[in-house]
C-alpha cells in the first residue's frame, strides 16, 4: 500500500540473536564507533549494521552477526580503492584489537 513502510529493523533485533559474550561486545563496539565523531551514521540492515561518515555514506565499518550468534564478522574499509579487511570477533580481546583499525578507517575514509 502506498505511504506505508515495512517494520523498521532495530539494533536490538540483532542483539536478540547473539549469544554471550558476543552480545555485550556488539554493544561496546557500537558505543566506540559512535564516539568517533558526530558525523558517524549507523544504518541497521536486515543482516548487518553499517557505519558510515556523513550523509554521503562513506562506509568504513560493516558488522555482521553470524548465523549461530557466537561471533561477529567485521569488514573495515579504508577507502574506495582499498579492499576491505575482514576480521572475526569472538572475544572481548578480539574486539579491543579491532578498535585501532576501526578508528584508523574512520580517519582515512573520504
Image (cartoon, rainbow, N blue to C red):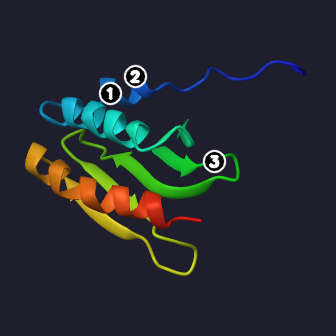
Mark nearest the camera among 3 and 2 is 3
- Give SS at disc 1: helix
Q: In the displayed structure, would residue 7 be above or below residue 102?
A: above
Q: Relative to residue 31, is residue 57 drawn left or right?
A: right
For the residues labelled 3 and 2, the Cα–Cα distance comes to 23 Å
Of the numbered discs in the image, which one, if any, rests on residue 54? 3
Pinpoint residue 5: horizontal percent, then vertical percent: 75, 22
Q: Which residue is mark 1?
A: 15
Picture residue at 39% right of the left edge, 61% below the top: 75
Neighbourhood count class around disc 3 (C-alpha, 10 Å): few under 14, some 14–19, many 20 upward? some
- Give SS at disc 2: helix
Q: Which residue is mark 2?
A: 12
Q: Is residue 4 visible?
A: yes
Pinpoint residue 109: horizontal percent, then vertical percent: 53, 65
For the residues labelled 3 and 1, the Cα–Cα distance comes to 25 Å
| N-terminal label among 3 and 2 | 2
Residue at the extreme right of the image, as rendered = 2
Pinpoint residue 84: horizontal percent, then vertical percent: 43, 71
Amino acid at each position: 500500500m502506498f505511504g506505508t513502510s515495512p517494520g523498521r529493523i532495530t539494533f536490538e533485533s540483532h542483539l536478540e540473536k547473539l549469544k554471550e559474550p558476543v552480545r555485550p561486545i556488539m554493544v561496546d563496539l557500537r558505543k566506540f564507533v559512535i564516539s568517533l565523531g558526530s558525523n558517524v551514521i549507523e544504518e541497521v540492515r536486515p543482516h548487518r549494521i553499517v557505519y558510515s561518515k556523513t550523509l554521503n555514506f562513506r562506509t568504513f565499518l560493516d558488522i555482521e552477526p553470524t548465523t549461530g550468534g557466537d561471533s561477529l564478522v567485521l569488514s573495515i574499509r579504508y577507502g574506495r580503492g582499498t579492499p576491505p579487511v575482514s576480521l572475526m570477533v569472538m572475544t572481548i580481546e578480539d574486539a579491543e584489537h579491532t578498535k585501532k583499525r576501526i578508528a584508523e578507517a574512520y580517519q582515512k575514509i573520504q
